[in-house]
């Protein structure tokens, strides 16, 4: 089983950033309002994610690190309409099989917290441990037992950059959640969150004030879909391919279909060669989109991609038409 988990880890866990992504998404699925992310050496030496979410019952800790034991999907119907970020029950067992791992948690009603250590996939005993409500996952020495994978890890800066980039895309989508990052013991980033934090304020925090000032607000519903967010005006000077964010039902995705629609709308008002910058959220009935395409879940498949393309294109064309006038 450890071997199977390590093989699965090959798909789920590419580098420290993929670990951070899986763990933070778990925290969000558990309803966390605040997530602390502590890193050492670009996450290779340590990734510690602490959340204030619902927590896990002590006797369910071993289950959480077992293969395909997800608490999020009860039936095939659920799989059709998955709304949580995770649903495969693969991340924790995979990560735990290629690291020195621990999972500590406490629910509101528990008298004390409990910790479970896992060493290269081998489960230890449950032990009591002081813990606030919520969950802490520690991942030390990623790939310590898989030298072939460890070899592919890049310099600390590079790995940290991947983590920060992913966190930025998350921060854009979840202004309601506070995110604190430290690296090698020093606080490096803080996205303050809160119910009343304006999405525009978060846009400024993540992509800069100029984008926040110059972004055209997009908001349109039709054909059972809603597209909202911002697209930078053609005059925005810092536009580049790495300021392109697309979310489908709250999930950050890379989708050629949508990217193409945006580009087409942009080209109507712009010189060739300039990159559009945008943060766009598409909401639609979950049964109209398949998120079960790739384990890392960057990709989605629309039941009717033509309709989506047209909707995005028309909406942005309208938004951008103002700048031409
Ligand atoms: P998935 O997210 O696909 O269900 P994971 O392997 O990521 O699978 O997690 C396994 C299970 O462990 C989850 O279904 C959830 O019940 C539990 N779990 C993991 N992380 C947390 C967390 N931070 N807070 C509460 N429960 C968690
Ligand atoms: Mg998960």
Image (cartoon, rainbow, N blue to C red):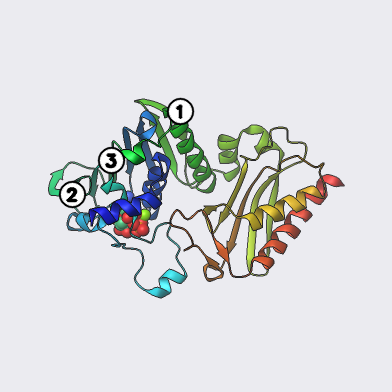
How far apart marks 2 and 1 lie (CA) works out to 31 Å
Q: Which residue is denoted by mark 3 in the rendering?
A: 138
Give the residue drawn at x 20%, y 55%.
62
Give the residue drawn at x 34%, y 40%.
148
Q: Residues within 10 Å of mark 3 (few under 14, many from 20)?
A: many
**Percent x, y for residue 4?**
28, 56
How far apart marks 2 and 3 lie (CA) works out to 15 Å
**Percent x, y for residue 310?**
72, 63
**Percent x, y for residue 159?**
44, 34
Q: Which mark is residue 77?
A: none
Quadrant for the N terminus in the image: bottom left
Q: Is residue 315 above or below residue 180?
A: below
Q: Earlier in the sequence, mark 1 or mark 3?
A: 3
The quarter of the image that holds ligand 1 is: bottom left
Mark 2: is the Cβ under 8 angstroms from ligand 1? Answer: no
Q: Which residue is denoted by mark 1 in the rendering?
A: 157
Determine which quarter of the picture holds residue 305.
bottom right
- Asked if labels 3 and 2 touch by Cβ distance under 8 angstroms, the answer is no
Q: Which residue is denoted by mark 2 in the rendering?
A: 122
Left or right: 292 with respect to 182?
Answer: right
- Asked if labels 1 and 2 touch by Cβ distance under 8 angstroms, the answer is no
Left or right: 11 with respect to 70?
Answer: right
Q: Earlier in the sequence, mark 2 or mark 3?
A: 2
Q: Nearer the viewer, residue 127 or 65?
A: 65
Q: Residues within 10 Å of mark 2 (few under 14, many from 20)?
A: few
**Percent x, y for residue 221?**
67, 63
Q: Secondary structure at mark 2?
A: strand
Q: Secondary structure at mark 1?
A: helix
Q: Secondary structure at mark 3?
A: strand
Q: From this viewpoint, is residue 54 visible?
A: no
How far apart marks 1 and 3 lie (CA) works out to 21 Å
Q: Earlier in the sequence, mark 2 or mark 1?
A: 2
């Amino acid at each position: 089983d450890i071997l199977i988990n390590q093989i699965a880890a090959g798909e789920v866990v590419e580098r420290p950033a993929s670990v951070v992504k899986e763990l933070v998404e778990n925290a969000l699925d558990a309803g966390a309002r605040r997530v602390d992310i502590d890193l050492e050496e670009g996450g290779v030496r340590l990734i510690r994610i602490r959340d204030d979410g619902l927590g896990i019952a002590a006797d369910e800790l071993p289950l959480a690190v077992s293969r395909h034991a997800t608490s999020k999907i009860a039936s095939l119907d659920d799989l059709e309409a998955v709304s949580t970020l995770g649903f495969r029950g693969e991340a924790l067992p995979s990560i735990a099989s290629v690291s020195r791992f621990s999972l500590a948690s406490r629910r509101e009603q528990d008298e004390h917290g409990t910790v479970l250590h896992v060493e290269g996939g081998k489960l230890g005993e449950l032990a009591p441990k002081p813990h606030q409500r919520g969950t802490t996952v520690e991942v030390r020495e990623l790939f310590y037992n898989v030298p072939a994978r460890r070899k592919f890890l890049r310099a600390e800066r590079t790995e940290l950059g991947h983590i920060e980039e992913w966190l930025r895309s998350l921060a854009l989508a979840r202004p309601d959640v506070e995110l604190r990052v430290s690296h090698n013991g020093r606080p490096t980033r803080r996205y303050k969150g809160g119910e009343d934090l304006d999405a525009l304020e978060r846009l400024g925090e993540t992509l800069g004030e100029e984008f926040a000032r110059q972004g055209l607000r997009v908001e349109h519903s039709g054909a059972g879909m809603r597209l909202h967010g911002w697209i930078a005006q053609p005059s925005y000077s810092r536009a580049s391919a790495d300021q392109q964010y697309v979310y489908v039902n709250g999930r950050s995705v890379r989708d050629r279909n949508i990217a193409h629609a945006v580009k087409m709308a942009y080209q109507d008002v712009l010189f060739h060669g300039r990159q559009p910058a945008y943060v766009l959220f598409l909401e639609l009935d979950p049964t109209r989109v398949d998120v079960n395409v790739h384990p890392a879940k960057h990709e989605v498949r629309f039941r009717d991609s033509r309709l989506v393309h047209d909707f995005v294109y028309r909406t942005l064309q309208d938004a951008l038409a103002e700048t031409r006038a």
